Image (cartoon, grey):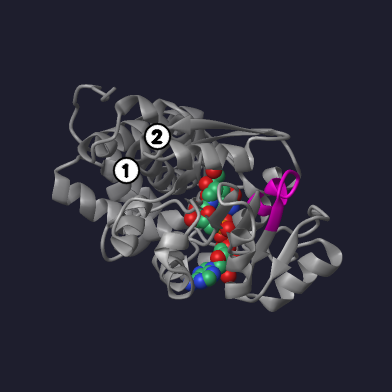
Amino acid sequence: MHITVFGSGAWGTAVATHMAFAHHVVLWGRDVQVVESINHVNENPRYLAGIKLNLHLKAEADFAEAARHALQGPADERLWVLGTPMGALRATLQALLNIVPFEKWPPIVWLCKGFEVGTGLMPHQVVEAVLGKPHGGALTGPSFAAEVAKGLPCALTAASACPAHRAAMVAAAHHAAMRVYELDDIVGAEVGGAVKNIMAVATGMCDGMQLGLNARAALITRGMAEIKRLAAALGAQPETLNGLSGFGDLILTCTGDLSRNRRVGLMLAQGKSLEQILQELGQVAEGVKCAPVVHELAARLGVDMPITAAVNATLFEGISPGEGVMRLLSRGAKSEQVPG
Ligand SMILES: NC(=O)C1=CN([C@@H]2O[C@H](COP(=O)(O)OP(=O)(O)OC[C@H]3O[C@@H](n4cnc5c(N)ncnc54)[C@H](O)[C@@H]3O)[C@@H](O)[C@H]2O)C=CC1
Ligand SMILES: O=C(CO)COP(=O)(O)O
């Protein structure tokens, strides 16, 4: 296949280096130093320092030139992978539309996890809003970029309502140490991928405050209940949340110290300000952007999401992590029903 990956952050670079083992891949990055470093020393020092990338991976700073690379392949062997954060999805789609008319587009895959700030839309809804019709799908699931870039095993979900686009994602990514499972429930896959980031912030706070392993297990389990309630309200298939994009990514991100979202929670527990934390992190933590959007969406849909509310209040309403915990513990008793 001929594949262009847009976005040379941690995850775009990791996916590109993996795909380059089986396909002709060009990685577009707006940071010229990163592009030169990938081309000259096979490294992305800004986002994946110390990891040697695939020698066949080519980086490109010219957006239109990079986009055209994928269009050079046979018609049914082309793919665009959108590897920028949620906040850049709409602009990236628009930039592509400005240079290639939609009739000539290959299937697309997006890697971002979140809800759009301002609209509350899921990624596939942003795509539909920009293009006027559904197109492509999400490659999602438990996958720390650094591990994928090193070629360690992982299993992902290729979620799309379109069988041909699911097949394109599998053809692009199912090789070497990566297994890719098809899924037709894009809503379930995207809700799981977005809301687990908020739960990872919560679990980071819990662990940072040394509240114990019991508290962590309770938080993750009740976090899953929240995710399932929101997913059901948005029309997901409940069983999707038991899979890689739900349960799998929730476990990984809540417990793995490679998670930027978990690290946000750990640093909040140390009493650092959000500004200081984001500066230290130097990479995207989608849970921070997503928490107020999901909090508002839950209120609008009448979905009870107390952990999300506590995380949001800790991030943006000036309460301490300890007060957030007290808010959760002081709620009245209720039954343990979990959808699906
Ligand atoms: N890092 C990981 O392990 C994984 C990340 N993801 C998701 O992938 C998405 C991207 O994450 P990362 O690559 O880790 O973030 P990152 O912080 O490592 O890199 C973000 C990249 O996007 C670029 N960017 C930001 N705004 C842009 C814009 N307006 N136009 C063009 N480029 C822009 C930045 O220059 C940078 O290269 C996020 O939604 C994240 O949740 C999903 C799975 C794994
Ligand atoms: O989505 C991820 C793993 O699947 C990455 O999580 P973080 O963004 O918290 O690092």
Q: Answer yes or no: disc 2 within 8 Å of ligand 2.
A: no
237 vs 67: above or below: above
Q: Indicate the amino acid at tag 2.
A: Leu
Instruction: Say which quarter of the image contains residue 234.
Output: top left
Instruction: Kindly report the distance in space between the C-alpha atoms of the residues bearing marks 2 and 1.
Output: 8 Å
317 vs 265: above or below: below
Along the line of sight, the residue nearer the viewer: 5 or 322: 5
Residue pictured at 60% horizontal, 67% vertical? 68
Q: Position of residue 31 (x, y in %)?
A: 65, 75
Crowding near pointer 2: few (<14 within 10 Å), some, many (20+)?
Answer: many
The numbered mark at residue 307 is 1
Q: Which comes sooner in the sequence, label 2 or label 1?
A: 2
Crowding near pointer 1: few (<14 within 10 Å), some, many (20+)?
Answer: many
Quadrant of the frame with the C terminus:
top left
Residue pictured at 43% horizontal, 43% vertical? 193
The numbered mark at residue 219 is 2
Residue pictured at 45% horizontal, 67% vertical? 88
Report whether residue 254 is seen.
Answer: yes
Horizontal side of 165 relative to 61 (left or right) equals: left
Along the line of sight, the residue nearer the viewer: 93 or 260: 93
In the image, residue 68 lies in the stretch drawn in magenta: no
SS class of the residue under badge 2? Answer: helix
SS class of the residue under badge 1? Answer: helix
115 vs 249: above or below: below
The answer to whether the residues at label 2 and label 1 have Cβ atoms under 8 Å apart is yes
Report whether residue 323 is seen.
Answer: no
Horizontal side of 104 relative to 50 (left or right) equals: left
In the image, residue 20 lies in the stretch drawn in magenta: yes
Residue numbers of the magenta segment: 15-25
Q: Position of residue 15 (x, y in %)?
A: 64, 50
